[in-house]
Amino acid sequence: MAGTAVPLALRRTRGERLSGAWYFLRRNPRMIVGGAIVGAWLLIALLAPFIAPYDPIKVNPIDSLIPPSPGHWLGTDDLGRDVLSRVMWGSRISLSVGLISVSIGLLVGTSLGLAAGYLGGTFDLLIMRGIDALLAFPALILAIAITSALGPQIQNSMIAIGIVAIPAYARLTRGQVLAVRQREYITAARTIGATPLRIVLRHIFPNVMNALIVQATLSTAFAILAEAALSFLGLGPQPPYPSWGQDINYSQRYLPNLKWWMSVGPGIAIFTAVFAFNFLGDALRDALDPRLRRSG
Amino acid sequence: MIQYILRRLLLMIPVTLLVTMGVFALARISPADPAVVFAGEDRDPAAIEEMRKELGLDQPLPVQYVAWLSKAVQGDLGRSFQNKQRVTEAILERIPVTFELGLAALTISVTLALLIGVLSAVKRNSLVDLLSTSVTLMGVSFPSFFLGVVLILVFAYVIPGHIFPPGGFTPITTDVGDNLRRLVLPAVTIATGSLALNLRQVRSSLLEVFGHEYIRTARAKGLRETVVVVRHALKNALIPVVTLVGIQVGAIIEGAVITEQIFSIPGIGRLAVQAIPSHDYPVVQGVVLVSALSFMVSTLLVDILYAWIDPRISYSAASA
Amino acid sequence: MRGLRIPILALFTVFAVVVGACSSSGGPSPSGSAAASGSAAAKANYGGTITFALENDVSNLDPMLSSLFVDRNIHYAIYDSLVRVDPKGNIIPWLAEKWTTSPDGKTVTFNLRQGVKYQDGTTFDAASVKWNIERYKTGKGSQRTGDLSAVDTVEVVDANTVKFNLKQPFAPLLAALVDRAGMMVSQKVADAQGADFTLKPFKAGTGPFILTEAVKNDHYTLEKNPDWWGKDSAGNKLPYLDKVIVKPILDGDVRLTNLRTGQVQYVNRLAGKDVASIKADSSLLYQETGSFAWSSMIPNEAPGFLFSDHRLVKAVAMAIDRQELLDKGPAQGVGIAGWGPISPAHAAYDSNFKPWPKADPEGAKKLVADALGPGKKLEFELLISSGDAATLQLAQLIQAELAKADIVANIKTQLFNDIVTLQQQHKHAGMTLVGWSGRLDPDGNTYDFVVTGKPNNDSAYSNAKVDDLMNQQRGESDPAKRTALLQQAQQIYVVDDPARVWFQFGLSNTASAKNLTGWSIYADLIPRFETAQLGK
């Protein structure tokens, strides 16, 4: 962190900020690529009901296992369902797993971190021991245990993946809070009688934002993969609604039979989405992390 | 320093208690009743009650926990509900397997990360940088189970000669060559998942070091770039990498969960994946305990190592 | 397929005595199967190691505790049972050379093979049989109590003769003694190993192979028992193979890949989707025969649940298209459409029993309207095991077929063990989709599933007439009369007052390396490697 009292962003005018944004967009092709793919998937998820060529659920045994063709760009699966339509609809579940589980982790983790860092003392000690325990719990085994205890349902996968993500946010936030707590502007705010909540929200939180955005982007990528891994272990979302993780597991057994197209659809979907979130996260980290920017 | 280590070890106790309580409670939320699952054909209520007693499930939860804990501290983790194997024995049998696989994966991942990372940091924002970060990110973007199966199929049907067998495990004591041959595909599968992370760490810590005064001084002195990078920058940039490697050693069990399943490797991850859905509580508890302990111990070791490498860090006033 | 329907007349006690007496003079049975496969010439090929890839992890090697099909693949190699079957399903002498049933059917006397030793060196005799049967009947957590429920006491007549006193005549007894309930275990090993026995029953059996290494989740090593009593038709000592390594490989595709790359020589229970390509592969040998296995949907008929009105169960049974499930489902045509639990591999099978030869959605609609009132839809939860793509495919196909009869099946996935728990406590809301690996005797495919209060009666079905018929057939020694009783009951619990929805029979199939010969395929899906040999 730079030693300046006011975060850099606050000192700039609006125009400067915009051109600054344009500057690093140009300097960061990764952000453009990542952002564009993420944007495209969000759009597909939003518009799935209008752009998907077929019903993703309806079984048509007569049309089963058709290779890619003009009628079915990505072919059909063993129950005669159009793979492209399933991939489009699947983006809804897979992306929501990502977004909702990240929100859970972000909300709970950040609150705990802010509270622990700001209040300090015994409260801090207790919270951080809990966080340590969560961190020491092997993440995937924890997710499997939670999902198998609560039952293989989409909400439960989201909760499990969300809980696994809590420690990262909590530690990140707490660290930042500790770092800025003693700064002059915080002390100043305190002396003029600002409430703790106001101090946290107005003065401390903005300092943590950048790091949180990066972490959230990266953990969305993790969540999409985790959903696939849970599906692999039989703990994925309920049928018949398509999700990428469920579908790639469902179709994988046809790979040796050379019915590759069933896997290609959900495979490319997971791959591009995870890649884009990771790419975007990395680019954001480089752009938003002042230590790295200074050294450029 | 000794005091610091003792304090850290002491702090591990409440954390371990929390973890074990967590897994204890978690295992018992599910609707299934192990007494029914393992009672056998005799399903009259009396027989099920007897089975519940035998499995120790008739006691109140806190009693069960204390009973388990008091045995666990003596190294006795109970017996598996499913096959009656001693859990301690089951875990000890599998630790070397998982550890070997994890180390192999880590070696591949860190070596590549160092090579590519240096190149990528030196030529920051060049095409090389962009390519290396993107390609490694592609690796992490594949679900590992899918990558594993594709690797198996490719080496079985596409690449002639069956260089790498489709899964299975041979103990290193039986046949070193076969052991290594079977290790390659699963290790690569795991390494692909962590390469991007390690690369990112190497690259960014190098970049950070590049910004420091002494590097600028070294450059200003007219030292050759290779010397600057290898002698000055890399050495200092390695500290965070050591941290990362240490944490990954602690998380080896975790990383192997899915891969062991695909490649039929008898490690700890596979043990856990099978025990959780079948409600084999003693096994689940044992695996989580061991895995949490290994994570905490390796984190501690990393911190100690850290202090040893970098004398600027003092732990006398270290925060909790 | 028709040719595979083999009468198993030997199952019926009276006839079995005759067969038993005859074949006991003909020498040990492995000769039969070795000769049948045509490759066991006088010159035997000794030696060699093969690897057998198993579909799942072995759970219990103690026959008493075992409740999974997969365990039996190893049991058959290390333990001998009192009697066995030949590939055609006839009961043949094994550890018992001969048996006689008393005229009232209430005692069965076994004359035991002499000079047989357990692999640990202890002697196999009548006292050992008594100890084993009593252990199965009273041991803690025993899964064999049902098989032996009719056995009251076991008496040692002399060292080589043992008498089973039955509570009532029990036709399926011999068939039960073929499998785990008749497997003989060394008392010394079992006592010494205690709780570890089920994991490591080293040298515990009298069988053709000795378990020498057991690494759970990885492999089980079976080494040749040089002192085994069996001989081939030319008098050569069996087994030929030195070693069989059994390796659980959970992923079906990885399993097959291991076979194709020569890592493994034998795989059973192949997925329908792979059969065509295996048949086409010239380096592999594909074999199949009818099996005893069936697939079913299990309604919860307990009071207060939707399917307590059995007309609704019948509506579901009428609405599904069994031929489409077979052809377009995961079986991909490898199997036989079925309506009841008595399989084509049983003598009691009735090939004309097709109550709904074609799907009848209109009939189903009428039944639902009768039961629920006009305009009401039948909607229920179909609970399936999570993580298995093939089951999911099948369930979705069923769902689509039921939709044609306006029946709504909501698929829900759940962990297999949780489903088992729910079923046993009769708490599942609608239906589950669970099959059965099948038993040699039709009783093992029917009785426990349809008789009031029996352990596998997961649908909580109760019909006094069915109970009566099923108990009668157990005591009936005349095969023809017994078949009639079994079929009469089947008409009731499938059609008139349905207990479940049965829809398919499985096939027993194997793929193996071309140079592995001498063995035969069995309807029970389990390999017997004692007669197998590895060509050069």
Image (cartoon, coloured by chain):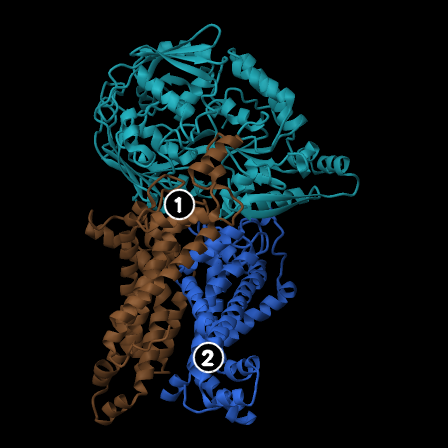
Chain letter corresponding to the colour blue: A
Numbered badge on residue C250 = 1
Q: Nearer the viewer, residue C173 or A139?
A: A139
User: Which residue: 33% across, 23% down?
Assistant: C184
Q: Which mark is residue A177?
A: 2
Picture quarter with the C terminus of chain C: top left
**Relative depth, front residue between C129 and A260:** C129
Label 1 Cα crowd, 10 Å radius (few <14 / some 14-19 / many 20+): some
| Image height of C41 relative to B296, above or below | above
The type of residue carrying mark 2 is Val
Residue C325 is situated, as x and y percent measured from the top left of the image, at 57, 39
The brown-coloured chain is labelled B
Check disc 1 and report its element: helix, strand or loop: loop
2 or 1: mark nearer the eye: 2
> Percent from the top left, x then y, of residue C304?
68, 37
Q: Element type at marker 2?
A: helix
Outermost residue toward the top?
A: C103
Quadrant hosting residue B246: bottom left
Three-letter code, disc 1 = Leu
Chain of the residue on which disc 2 is drawn: A
Question: Does B268 sit left or right of A265 as displayed?
Answer: left
Residue drawn at (23%, 74%), measured in percent from left and top?
B308
Residue A166 bears which disc, if any?
none
Q: Residues within 10 Å of mark 2 (few under 14, many from 20)?
A: many
User: Up-down: is A241 above or below C360?
Assistant: below
Which chain does cyan denote in the image? C
The residue closer to the viewer here, B250 or C368, is: B250
Q: Could you tell me which residue is drawn at 34 percent across and 20 percent down?
A: C131
Q: Position of residue C301 (x, y in %)?
A: 64, 34
Q: Are marks 2 and 1 on the same chain?
A: no
Is residue C98 or residue B163 the one in the foreground? C98
